[in-house]
Image (cartoon, rainbow, N blue to C red):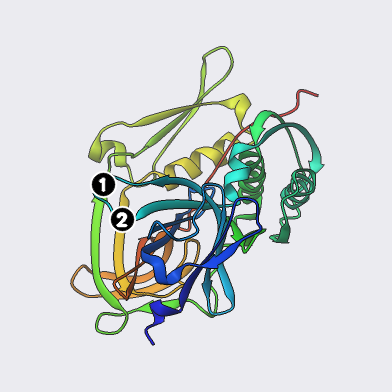
Amino acid sequence: MAYGDLLKIRAWSLDGTRTEHITEKVQAKTWSGSYRDCARQLTFSVLPEALAELGGQVRLYLGPDILFSGHIVSRSRDSPGKTIDCTALDNGLYLKRSSTYMAVRNQTAEAVTAQLCGEFGVPCGALAATGVPLSRNFLGVSLYQIMQTMYTLAAEQTGKQYQIRFLSNHLTVVEKAVGTESIRLVPGSNLVSCRSSESIENMVNRVAVYDDAFRKLAQYDSPENYAALYGLMQKAVKASEREKPEAAARDILEQNGISTTITAQCLGNVKLITGTAVAVHEPVTGTDGLFWITADSHTVRRGVYQTKVTLDFRNLMDKQTAGSLPKE
């Protein structure tokens, strides 16, 4: 049996009273996500007689393991089509669509995340511990932005990167670190093809810090002297918006240099998901070393299972800076 044949889909009716294993009625399916996505996504094309109601729950299984659990948020069908195209999102949808007011005082990111999960009925799993107490005001901010902002601010002090994920229905936060299960991608084995591209389109090579009176307090240039090479591309920040403007400026410069994007087409593997590290050796493009998956897409079509990943040598997280510092 092909590996892709083990990926099964089960659906429930909107009221939860009916359920059906619809795998045999699904023509194609794609499970995907990226480090900037609040929710992972499952798209599939299914025969009209299958149970696939708008708002109904769907799950993607690998054997007994739940890879995805969410609800169908959209359905579409054109006149000549013989299938219905469905899109489902996991519970990250509710983190994005729900907002609140919150005054955080000397609380850690993990404590705030657990508190919000309890208040909004989101099942909570393991949360990466930062141990960094923070204070911040959030006025009408989404749950995802609050959680991600707290972990972003903590990351500035711990030097670590964090990723929010849902395992089954449970929200988890993991530290993005190289593990013993990191996969090696090699041509002739599990790497089908590789493409590498470079860009300076979104470069920032100078950060200028201003105060409330519009006076420039400091400026920080990229250590590679990119401004002289590619022209000045400056980002202005307000001193009062940052606890440590120098550290924030250095981080901006580091994250916005020459962008190298690598996409790899691989044999299907459910372990190749956003936030994990892979080792790549591909001599044609010169891609060699340790990289982080910033986006992944798993597709099963006509019995063939392939995974496409976007890689970056930087360990990136979705940095958010919602809310503001307390005035007291």
Q: Residue 216 location in percent, x, y?
A: 49, 20
As helix, strand or loop, the secondary structure at mark 1 comes to: strand
| In the foreground, 202 or 298 | 298
Q: Quadrant of residue 169?
A: bottom right
Mark 1 lies on residue: 199
Answer few, some or many: residues within 10 Å of disc 1's Cα (few below 14, many 20 plus, some between 14 and 19). few
Residue 313 visible: no
Q: Quadrant of residue 245?
A: top right
For residue 51, above or below residue 156: below
Residue at 45% x, 61% y: name it.
50
Which badge, 2 or 1, comes first in the chain's sequence? 1
As helix, strand or loop, the secondary structure at mark 2 comes to: strand
Residue at 43% x, 63% y: name it.
292
Residue at 64% x, 44% y: name it.
153
93 lies left or right of 314: right
Q: CA distance from mark 2 to mark 1?
A: 8 Å
Q: Residue 134 location in percent, x, y?
A: 75, 41
Mark 2 lies on residue: 261
Q: Residue 1 location in percent, x, y?
A: 39, 87
| In the foreground, 291 or 47 | 47
For residue 203, above or below residue 138: below
Residue 26 visible: yes
Q: Are marks 2 and 1 in contact (CB under 8 Å)?
A: yes
